[in-house]
Image: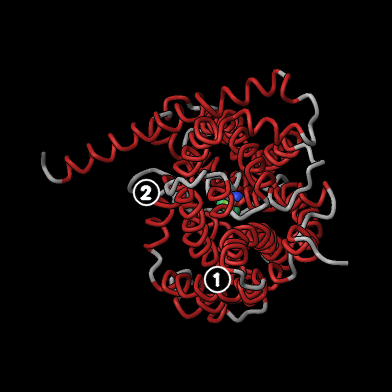
Amino acid sequence: MANTPIDTRGTWNTKLGFILAAAGSAVGLGNIWGFPTQVADNGGAAFILIYLLCCVAIGFPVMIAELTIGRKTKKNPVGAFKALSNGNSFVPLIGYWGVLCGVMILSFYLVISGWTLGYVFEELFHYFGYSSIASIMGDLENGPKNTVFTLIFMVMTVAIITGGVSKGIERATKMLMPVLIAILLILIGYVFTLDGAMEGFWVYVYPDFSTISGSLILSAMGQAFFSLSLGMGALITYGSYLNRKQNLVESAGYVTLFDIGIAVIAGLLVIPAMYVAQAGGIEIFNPETQKLYSSTTLVFDVLPEMFHNVGAFLGLFLGVTFFVLLGLAALTSSISLLEVPVSYVIDEHGIERKKAAMLVGGLVSILAIIISFNLSLIDIFVFIFNEIGLPLGGLMLCLFLGYFWKSENAVIEIESGYPGFGTSVTSTLWVLFIKYVCPLLIGIVFVTTFMTVAQSLMEMFGF
Ligand code: PFF
Protein backbone atom coordinates (compact mmCIF):
# COMPACT_ATOMS: atom_id res chain seq x y z
CA MET A 1 0.00 0.00 0.00
CA ALA A 2 1.38 3.40 -0.89
CA ASN A 3 2.18 5.64 2.03
CA THR A 4 0.55 9.02 2.30
CA PRO A 5 2.76 11.88 3.45
CA ILE A 6 1.05 11.71 6.85
CA ASP A 7 1.85 8.02 7.23
CA THR A 8 5.51 8.67 6.53
CA ARG A 9 5.61 11.42 9.19
CA GLY A 10 4.23 8.96 11.74
CA THR A 11 1.21 9.06 14.05
CA TRP A 12 0.51 8.09 17.65
CA ASN A 13 -0.87 4.59 17.95
CA THR A 14 -3.30 5.21 20.79
CA LYS A 15 -4.89 8.10 22.66
CA LEU A 16 -3.17 7.02 25.89
CA GLY A 17 0.14 6.68 24.06
CA PHE A 18 0.00 10.31 23.01
CA ILE A 19 -1.03 11.53 26.47
CA LEU A 20 1.83 9.63 28.08
CA ALA A 21 4.32 10.90 25.51
CA ALA A 22 3.19 14.50 26.05
CA ALA A 23 3.18 13.98 29.82
CA GLY A 24 6.64 12.44 29.50
CA SER A 25 7.79 15.57 27.72
CA ALA A 26 6.28 17.72 30.45
CA VAL A 27 7.51 15.73 33.44
CA GLY A 28 11.26 16.17 33.66
CA LEU A 29 14.06 17.92 35.46
CA GLY A 30 11.73 20.92 35.71
CA ASN A 31 9.40 18.98 38.03
CA ILE A 32 11.90 17.14 40.19
CA TRP A 33 14.96 19.42 40.13
CA GLY A 34 13.41 22.85 39.47
CA PHE A 35 9.95 23.03 41.04
CA PRO A 36 10.55 21.76 44.61
CA THR A 37 13.57 23.95 45.22
CA GLN A 38 11.84 27.02 43.77
CA VAL A 39 8.94 26.35 46.16
CA ALA A 40 11.20 25.99 49.18
CA ASP A 41 13.10 29.14 48.25
CA ASN A 42 10.10 31.29 47.35
CA GLY A 43 7.60 31.14 50.16
CA GLY A 44 6.36 27.53 50.06
CA ALA A 45 2.73 27.23 49.12
CA ALA A 46 2.58 30.90 48.03
CA PHE A 47 4.80 30.01 45.06
CA ILE A 48 2.70 26.90 44.40
CA LEU A 49 -0.43 29.05 44.17
CA ILE A 50 1.11 31.48 41.67
CA TYR A 51 2.55 28.56 39.74
CA LEU A 52 -0.83 26.81 39.59
CA LEU A 53 -2.42 30.03 38.40
CA CYS A 54 0.17 30.31 35.60
CA CYS A 55 -0.42 26.67 34.60
CA VAL A 56 -4.19 26.98 34.50
CA ALA A 57 -4.62 30.54 33.18
CA ILE A 58 -1.72 30.57 30.71
CA GLY A 59 -0.27 27.08 30.27
CA PHE A 60 -3.49 25.16 29.63
CA PRO A 61 -4.89 27.55 26.95
CA VAL A 62 -1.48 27.80 25.24
CA MET A 63 -1.17 24.01 25.23
CA ILE A 64 -4.53 23.67 23.45
CA ALA A 65 -3.33 26.31 20.96
CA GLU A 66 -0.05 24.47 20.23
CA LEU A 67 -1.79 21.11 19.73
CA THR A 68 -4.37 22.74 17.46
CA ILE A 69 -1.77 24.39 15.22
CA GLY A 70 0.20 21.13 15.07
CA ARG A 71 -2.75 18.94 14.17
CA LYS A 72 -4.14 21.44 11.66
CA THR A 73 -0.89 21.72 9.70
CA LYS A 74 0.66 18.29 10.41
CA LYS A 75 4.04 20.00 10.42
CA ASN A 76 7.02 20.95 12.56
CA PRO A 77 6.85 24.44 14.17
CA VAL A 78 8.55 26.25 11.26
CA GLY A 79 6.47 24.44 8.63
CA ALA A 80 3.31 24.96 10.69
CA PHE A 81 3.69 28.73 10.90
CA LYS A 82 4.72 28.86 7.23
CA ALA A 83 1.60 26.91 6.25
CA LEU A 84 -0.63 29.40 8.07
CA SER A 85 1.36 32.54 7.20
CA ASN A 86 -0.45 33.56 4.03
CA GLY A 87 2.92 34.49 2.60
CA ASN A 88 3.83 36.79 5.50
CA SER A 89 7.54 36.41 6.08
CA PHE A 90 7.52 37.31 9.79
CA VAL A 91 5.14 34.58 10.93
CA PRO A 92 7.55 31.63 10.35
CA LEU A 93 10.04 33.42 12.63
CA ILE A 94 7.90 32.24 15.58
CA GLY A 95 8.69 28.67 14.50
CA TYR A 96 12.39 29.38 14.00
CA TRP A 97 12.52 30.93 17.49
CA GLY A 98 10.99 27.71 18.85
CA VAL A 99 13.55 25.51 17.09
CA LEU A 100 16.37 27.72 18.39
CA CYS A 101 15.03 27.55 21.96
CA GLY A 102 14.73 23.75 21.59
CA VAL A 103 18.36 23.39 20.53
CA MET A 104 19.70 25.73 23.22
CA ILE A 105 17.59 24.27 26.04
CA LEU A 106 18.50 20.72 25.01
CA SER A 107 22.21 21.58 25.10
CA PHE A 108 22.20 22.41 28.82
CA TYR A 109 19.44 19.92 29.63
CA LEU A 110 21.73 17.11 28.47
CA VAL A 111 24.53 18.25 30.76
CA ILE A 112 22.23 18.21 33.81
CA SER A 113 20.80 14.85 32.68
CA GLY A 114 24.40 13.61 32.45
CA TRP A 115 24.93 14.60 36.09
CA THR A 116 22.05 12.34 37.13
CA LEU A 117 23.70 9.42 35.36
CA GLY A 118 27.05 10.29 36.93
CA TYR A 119 25.44 10.20 40.36
CA VAL A 120 24.03 6.71 39.81
CA PHE A 121 27.68 5.61 39.53
CA GLU A 122 28.75 7.90 42.38
CA GLU A 123 26.34 6.10 44.70
CA LEU A 124 27.57 2.68 43.55
CA PHE A 125 31.29 3.48 43.84
CA HIS A 126 30.72 5.12 47.21
CA TYR A 127 28.93 2.03 48.50
CA PHE A 128 31.69 -0.32 47.36
CA GLY A 129 34.33 1.89 48.96
CA TYR A 130 35.96 3.37 45.84
CA SER A 131 35.71 6.87 47.19
CA SER A 132 38.13 8.57 44.80
CA ILE A 133 36.26 7.32 41.71
CA ALA A 134 33.00 8.19 43.49
CA SER A 135 34.12 11.76 43.96
CA ILE A 136 35.03 12.07 40.26
CA MET A 137 31.56 10.77 39.33
CA GLY A 138 29.99 13.33 41.63
CA ASP A 139 32.17 16.24 40.55
CA LEU A 140 29.81 18.55 38.69
CA GLU A 141 32.66 20.69 37.39
CA ASN A 142 34.66 17.87 35.85
CA GLY A 143 34.47 18.71 32.12
CA PRO A 144 35.69 15.38 30.66
CA LYS A 145 33.39 13.39 32.97
CA ASN A 146 30.47 15.71 32.12
CA THR A 147 31.19 15.23 28.42
CA VAL A 148 31.10 11.43 28.65
CA PHE A 149 27.78 11.29 30.51
CA THR A 150 26.25 14.05 28.38
CA LEU A 151 27.13 12.11 25.24
CA ILE A 152 25.72 8.86 26.67
CA PHE A 153 22.48 10.70 27.29
CA MET A 154 22.49 12.15 23.80
CA VAL A 155 23.03 8.72 22.25
CA MET A 156 20.06 7.29 24.18
CA THR A 157 17.87 10.21 23.08
CA VAL A 158 18.92 9.90 19.43
CA ALA A 159 18.34 6.12 19.53
CA ILE A 160 14.75 6.56 20.73
CA ILE A 161 14.01 9.36 18.25
CA THR A 162 15.40 7.26 15.42
CA GLY A 163 12.78 4.61 16.20
CA GLY A 164 10.11 7.09 15.04
CA VAL A 165 6.92 8.35 16.60
CA SER A 166 4.96 5.27 17.67
CA LYS A 167 7.72 2.65 17.79
CA GLY A 168 10.30 4.97 19.36
CA ILE A 169 8.84 7.85 21.36
CA GLU A 170 5.43 6.34 22.22
CA ARG A 171 6.75 2.91 23.16
CA ALA A 172 9.59 4.29 25.30
CA THR A 173 7.44 6.76 27.24
CA LYS A 174 4.67 4.20 27.77
CA MET A 175 7.20 1.97 29.50
CA LEU A 176 9.10 4.67 31.37
CA MET A 177 6.26 6.77 32.84
CA PRO A 178 4.72 4.08 35.12
CA VAL A 179 8.22 3.16 36.37
CA LEU A 180 8.86 6.80 37.16
CA ILE A 181 5.66 7.17 39.19
CA ALA A 182 6.31 3.94 41.10
CA ILE A 183 9.85 5.04 42.03
CA LEU A 184 8.60 8.44 43.16
CA LEU A 185 6.00 6.93 45.48
CA ILE A 186 8.40 4.39 46.98
CA LEU A 187 10.92 7.12 47.76
CA ILE A 188 8.31 9.40 49.36
CA GLY A 189 7.07 6.52 51.51
CA TYR A 190 10.55 5.92 52.82
CA VAL A 191 11.69 9.54 53.30
CA PHE A 192 8.67 10.23 55.51
CA THR A 193 9.90 7.67 58.00
CA LEU A 194 13.10 9.72 58.56
CA ASP A 195 13.76 12.52 61.07
CA GLY A 196 13.23 16.03 59.74
CA ALA A 197 10.78 15.02 56.98
CA MET A 198 7.77 16.55 58.74
CA GLU A 199 9.57 19.88 59.14
CA GLY A 200 10.17 19.89 55.38
CA PHE A 201 6.53 19.01 54.81
CA TRP A 202 5.37 22.08 56.76
CA VAL A 203 7.78 24.38 54.91
CA TYR A 204 6.24 23.01 51.72
CA VAL A 205 2.60 23.51 52.58
CA TYR A 206 2.84 26.73 54.64
CA PRO A 207 2.33 29.80 52.43
CA ASP A 208 4.48 32.90 53.04
CA PHE A 209 2.82 35.60 50.95
CA SER A 210 5.42 38.24 51.85
CA THR A 211 7.80 36.68 49.30
CA ILE A 212 5.57 37.42 46.29
CA SER A 213 7.25 39.88 43.93
CA GLY A 214 7.61 40.62 40.21
CA SER A 215 10.63 38.38 39.85
CA LEU A 216 8.91 35.56 41.72
CA ILE A 217 6.00 35.76 39.29
CA LEU A 218 8.41 35.70 36.31
CA SER A 219 10.09 32.62 37.76
CA ALA A 220 6.72 30.93 38.31
CA MET A 221 5.66 31.74 34.75
CA GLY A 222 8.98 30.60 33.25
CA GLN A 223 8.72 27.46 35.35
CA ALA A 224 5.15 26.81 34.12
CA PHE A 225 6.17 27.17 30.45
CA PHE A 226 9.27 25.03 30.95
CA SER A 227 7.49 22.38 32.94
CA LEU A 228 4.57 22.09 30.54
CA SER A 229 6.99 22.09 27.56
CA LEU A 230 5.36 25.15 26.04
CA GLY A 231 6.50 28.11 23.98
CA MET A 232 8.93 26.35 21.65
CA GLY A 233 6.66 24.17 19.57
CA ALA A 234 7.24 20.80 21.25
CA LEU A 235 3.50 20.34 21.46
CA ILE A 236 2.97 21.67 17.95
CA THR A 237 5.26 18.85 16.88
CA TYR A 238 3.57 16.22 19.08
CA GLY A 239 0.16 17.58 17.96
CA SER A 240 1.17 17.12 14.32
CA TYR A 241 1.21 13.34 14.88
CA LEU A 242 -2.39 13.32 16.19
CA ASN A 243 -5.43 12.13 14.31
CA ARG A 244 -8.56 14.24 13.90
CA LYS A 245 -10.56 12.09 16.33
CA GLN A 246 -8.55 13.17 19.38
CA ASN A 247 -10.21 15.67 21.72
CA LEU A 248 -7.48 18.30 22.04
CA VAL A 249 -9.01 20.13 25.02
CA GLU A 250 -9.39 16.93 27.02
CA SER A 251 -5.86 15.77 26.13
CA ALA A 252 -4.32 19.13 27.09
CA GLY A 253 -6.28 18.93 30.36
CA TYR A 254 -4.88 15.50 31.20
CA VAL A 255 -1.32 16.50 30.37
CA THR A 256 -1.54 19.73 32.44
CA LEU A 257 -3.03 17.89 35.43
CA PHE A 258 -0.47 15.11 35.16
CA ASP A 259 2.41 17.55 35.07
CA ILE A 260 1.12 19.62 38.00
CA GLY A 261 0.43 16.42 39.94
CA ILE A 262 3.95 15.05 39.45
CA ALA A 263 5.54 18.40 40.37
CA VAL A 264 3.49 18.61 43.57
CA ILE A 265 4.32 14.97 44.43
CA ALA A 266 8.02 15.53 43.65
CA GLY A 267 7.92 18.44 46.11
CA LEU A 268 6.71 15.98 48.74
CA LEU A 269 9.88 14.02 48.15
CA VAL A 270 12.56 16.64 47.61
CA ILE A 271 11.67 19.24 50.28
CA PRO A 272 11.23 16.74 53.15
CA ALA A 273 14.44 15.00 51.96
CA MET A 274 16.30 18.32 52.21
CA TYR A 275 15.16 18.73 55.79
CA VAL A 276 16.10 15.14 56.56
CA ALA A 277 19.58 16.11 55.36
CA GLN A 278 19.51 19.15 57.65
CA ALA A 279 18.42 17.01 60.60
CA GLY A 280 21.47 14.85 59.83
CA GLY A 281 23.76 17.87 60.24
CA ILE A 282 24.09 18.84 56.56
CA GLU A 283 23.82 22.56 55.77
CA ILE A 284 20.99 23.45 53.39
CA PHE A 285 21.06 27.23 53.92
CA ASN A 286 23.94 29.38 52.78
CA PRO A 287 25.34 30.76 56.09
CA GLU A 288 26.14 34.13 54.47
CA THR A 289 22.83 34.88 52.79
CA GLN A 290 20.59 32.69 54.95
CA LYS A 291 18.95 31.59 51.70
CA LEU A 292 18.62 28.01 50.53
CA TYR A 293 21.48 26.74 48.41
CA SER A 294 20.81 26.65 44.65
CA SER A 295 18.72 23.81 43.26
CA THR A 296 21.87 22.28 41.77
CA THR A 297 23.65 22.20 45.13
CA LEU A 298 20.56 20.86 46.87
CA VAL A 299 19.84 18.06 44.42
CA PHE A 300 23.39 17.12 43.49
CA ASP A 301 25.28 17.78 46.75
CA VAL A 302 22.89 17.80 49.70
CA LEU A 303 20.70 14.86 48.72
CA PRO A 304 23.59 12.50 47.88
CA GLU A 305 25.17 13.38 51.21
CA MET A 306 21.88 12.54 52.90
CA PHE A 307 21.80 9.18 51.08
CA HIS A 308 25.34 8.49 52.28
CA ASN A 309 24.28 9.38 55.84
CA VAL A 310 21.44 6.87 55.69
CA GLY A 311 24.26 4.49 54.92
CA ALA A 312 24.56 0.82 54.08
CA PHE A 313 22.44 -0.86 51.44
CA LEU A 314 19.40 1.31 52.15
CA GLY A 315 21.34 4.51 51.40
CA LEU A 316 22.58 2.95 48.18
CA PHE A 317 19.08 1.87 47.22
CA LEU A 318 17.61 5.32 47.89
CA GLY A 319 20.41 7.14 46.08
CA VAL A 320 20.43 4.97 42.98
CA THR A 321 16.65 4.93 42.79
CA PHE A 322 16.43 8.72 43.10
CA PHE A 323 18.96 9.40 40.35
CA VAL A 324 17.48 6.75 38.06
CA LEU A 325 14.13 8.50 38.58
CA LEU A 326 15.62 11.86 37.67
CA GLY A 327 17.38 10.34 34.65
CA LEU A 328 14.21 8.67 33.32
CA ALA A 329 12.22 11.87 33.71
CA ALA A 330 14.96 13.77 31.89
CA LEU A 331 15.08 11.21 29.07
CA THR A 332 11.37 11.41 28.21
CA SER A 333 11.75 15.21 28.07
CA SER A 334 14.96 15.37 26.08
CA ILE A 335 13.25 13.17 23.49
CA SER A 336 10.70 15.91 22.87
CA LEU A 337 13.32 18.66 22.93
CA LEU A 338 15.26 16.86 20.20
CA GLU A 339 12.14 15.95 18.22
CA VAL A 340 11.43 19.65 17.54
CA PRO A 341 14.60 20.42 15.51
CA VAL A 342 14.65 16.88 14.08
CA SER A 343 11.09 17.17 12.72
CA TYR A 344 12.08 20.56 11.28
CA VAL A 345 15.03 19.02 9.41
CA ILE A 346 12.89 16.07 8.19
CA ASP A 347 9.97 18.20 6.98
CA GLU A 348 11.72 21.29 5.69
CA HIS A 349 14.93 19.81 4.32
CA GLY A 350 13.65 16.39 3.23
CA ILE A 351 16.29 14.50 5.23
CA GLU A 352 15.40 11.01 6.40
CA ARG A 353 14.67 10.55 10.16
CA LYS A 354 17.77 8.60 11.17
CA LYS A 355 20.14 10.98 9.42
CA ALA A 356 18.26 14.01 10.73
CA ALA A 357 18.44 12.72 14.31
CA MET A 358 22.17 12.08 14.03
CA LEU A 359 22.85 15.42 12.36
CA VAL A 360 20.95 17.51 14.90
CA GLY A 361 22.15 15.29 17.74
CA GLY A 362 25.74 15.88 16.62
CA LEU A 363 25.31 19.65 16.45
CA VAL A 364 23.63 19.86 19.85
CA SER A 365 26.38 17.63 21.29
CA ILE A 366 29.02 20.18 20.31
CA LEU A 367 27.14 22.87 22.23
CA ALA A 368 26.60 20.50 25.16
CA ILE A 369 30.33 19.70 25.32
CA ILE A 370 31.14 23.42 25.44
CA ILE A 371 28.67 23.77 28.33
CA SER A 372 30.15 20.69 30.06
CA PHE A 373 33.36 22.70 30.48
CA ASN A 374 31.71 26.11 31.08
CA LEU A 375 28.88 25.58 33.53
CA SER A 376 28.23 29.30 34.01
CA LEU A 377 26.60 29.18 30.56
CA ILE A 378 23.72 27.19 32.08
CA ASP A 379 22.39 30.17 34.07
CA ILE A 380 22.72 32.43 31.02
CA PHE A 381 20.88 29.94 28.78
CA VAL A 382 18.18 29.39 31.41
CA PHE A 383 17.55 33.13 31.60
CA ILE A 384 17.53 33.79 27.83
CA PHE A 385 15.88 30.68 26.42
CA ASN A 386 13.80 29.42 29.30
CA GLU A 387 12.68 32.35 31.44
CA ILE A 388 12.39 34.84 28.57
CA GLY A 389 12.38 32.65 25.45
CA LEU A 390 9.52 30.30 26.24
CA PRO A 391 7.01 32.90 27.51
CA LEU A 392 7.98 35.06 24.50
CA GLY A 393 7.23 32.13 22.20
CA GLY A 394 3.91 31.67 24.01
CA LEU A 395 3.07 35.36 23.63
CA MET A 396 3.78 35.34 19.89
CA LEU A 397 1.74 32.16 19.50
CA CYS A 398 -1.30 33.69 21.25
CA LEU A 399 -1.12 36.88 19.18
CA PHE A 400 -0.68 34.86 15.99
CA LEU A 401 -3.60 32.56 16.73
CA GLY A 402 -5.94 35.24 18.02
CA TYR A 403 -5.31 38.00 15.49
CA PHE A 404 -3.60 36.56 12.40
CA TRP A 405 -4.83 33.02 11.82
CA LYS A 406 -8.00 33.96 13.75
CA SER A 407 -9.47 32.00 16.63
CA GLU A 408 -12.54 30.98 14.56
CA ASN A 409 -10.29 28.78 12.40
CA ALA A 410 -8.68 27.22 15.44
CA VAL A 411 -12.12 26.52 16.92
CA ILE A 412 -13.12 24.71 13.71
CA GLU A 413 -9.98 22.52 14.00
CA ILE A 414 -10.74 21.69 17.65
CA GLU A 415 -14.34 20.82 16.70
CA SER A 416 -13.16 17.67 14.94
CA GLY A 417 -12.60 15.41 17.90
CA TYR A 418 -14.75 17.61 20.16
CA PRO A 419 -18.16 18.07 18.49
CA GLY A 420 -20.08 21.01 19.96
CA PHE A 421 -16.92 22.81 21.10
CA GLY A 422 -17.70 25.89 19.00
CA THR A 423 -20.92 26.62 20.88
CA SER A 424 -19.64 25.68 24.33
CA VAL A 425 -18.64 28.01 27.18
CA THR A 426 -15.20 26.36 27.12
CA SER A 427 -14.64 27.68 23.61
CA THR A 428 -15.67 31.24 24.56
CA LEU A 429 -13.37 31.13 27.58
CA TRP A 430 -10.48 29.68 25.60
CA VAL A 431 -10.72 32.40 22.92
CA LEU A 432 -10.93 35.06 25.65
CA PHE A 433 -7.79 33.72 27.31
CA ILE A 434 -5.80 33.33 24.07
CA LYS A 435 -6.72 36.76 22.71
CA TYR A 436 -6.66 38.86 25.86
CA VAL A 437 -5.81 37.25 29.20
CA CYS A 438 -2.62 35.33 28.27
CA PRO A 439 -0.99 38.11 26.19
CA LEU A 440 -1.83 40.64 28.90
CA LEU A 441 -0.47 38.52 31.75
CA ILE A 442 2.70 37.55 29.87
CA GLY A 443 3.13 41.18 28.75
CA ILE A 444 2.78 42.56 32.30
CA VAL A 445 5.32 40.09 33.65
CA PHE A 446 7.76 41.00 30.84
CA VAL A 447 7.42 44.75 31.36
CA THR A 448 7.94 44.40 35.12
CA THR A 449 10.99 42.20 34.60
CA PHE A 450 12.59 44.51 32.07
CA MET A 451 12.02 47.44 34.41
CA THR A 452 13.65 45.56 37.29
CA VAL A 453 16.59 44.47 35.12
CA ALA A 454 17.01 48.01 33.75
CA GLN A 455 16.88 49.45 37.26
CA SER A 456 19.53 47.08 38.60
CA LEU A 457 21.74 47.76 35.56
CA MET A 458 21.43 51.50 36.17
CA GLU A 459 22.29 51.02 39.82
CA MET A 460 25.25 48.88 38.79
CA PHE A 461 26.60 51.63 36.57
CA GLY A 462 25.93 54.28 39.23
CA PHE A 463 22.99 56.17 37.67
N1 PFF B 1 9.17 19.95 30.50
C1 PFF B 1 10.53 19.56 30.69
C2 PFF B 1 10.86 19.58 32.18
O1 PFF B 1 10.01 19.96 32.99
O2 PFF B 1 11.97 19.22 32.54
C3 PFF B 1 11.51 20.40 29.91
C4 PFF B 1 11.08 20.73 28.50
C5 PFF B 1 10.82 19.70 27.61
C6 PFF B 1 10.90 22.04 28.13
C7 PFF B 1 10.39 20.01 26.32
C8 PFF B 1 10.46 22.38 26.87
C9 PFF B 1 10.21 21.33 25.97
F1 PFF B 1 9.82 21.63 24.79
Q: Position of residue 107 (x, y in %)?
A: 49, 65
Residue beneath disc 2: 287
Disc 2 is placed on an element classified as: loop
Other residues around mark 1 within 10 Å, as few (<14) / some (14–19) / many (≥20): some
Residue beneath disc 1: 360
Q: Which mark is drawn over residue 35?
A: none
Dot 1 amino acid type: Val
- Residue 136 visible from this viewpoint: yes
117 w.r.t. 458: above or below: below
333 w.r.t. 256: above or below: below
Dot 2 amino acid type: Pro
Other residues around mark 2 within 10 Å, as few (<14) / some (14–19) / many (≥20): few
395 w.r.t. 334: above or below: above
Q: Residue at x 78, y 37 (%)?
A: 247
Q: Position of residue 217 (x, y in %)?
A: 44, 33
The mark that comes first in sequence, 2 or 1, is 2
In-image side of 208 versus 117 (left or right): left
Q: Nearer the viewer, mark 2 or mark 1?
A: 1
Q: Is mark 2 within 8 Å of ligand 1?
A: no
- Residue 30 visible from this viewpoint: no
Depth check, front residue: 86 or 430? 86
- In the picture, the quarter occupied by the C terminus is top left
Q: Determine whether label 2 and label 1 are within 8 Å by CB.
A: no
Q: Residue furthest front?
A: 87
In-image side of 388 versus 153 (left or right): left
Q: Position of residue 122 (x, y in %)?
A: 60, 73
Q: Position of residue 285 (x, y in %)?
A: 44, 47
Disc 1 is placed on an element classified as: helix
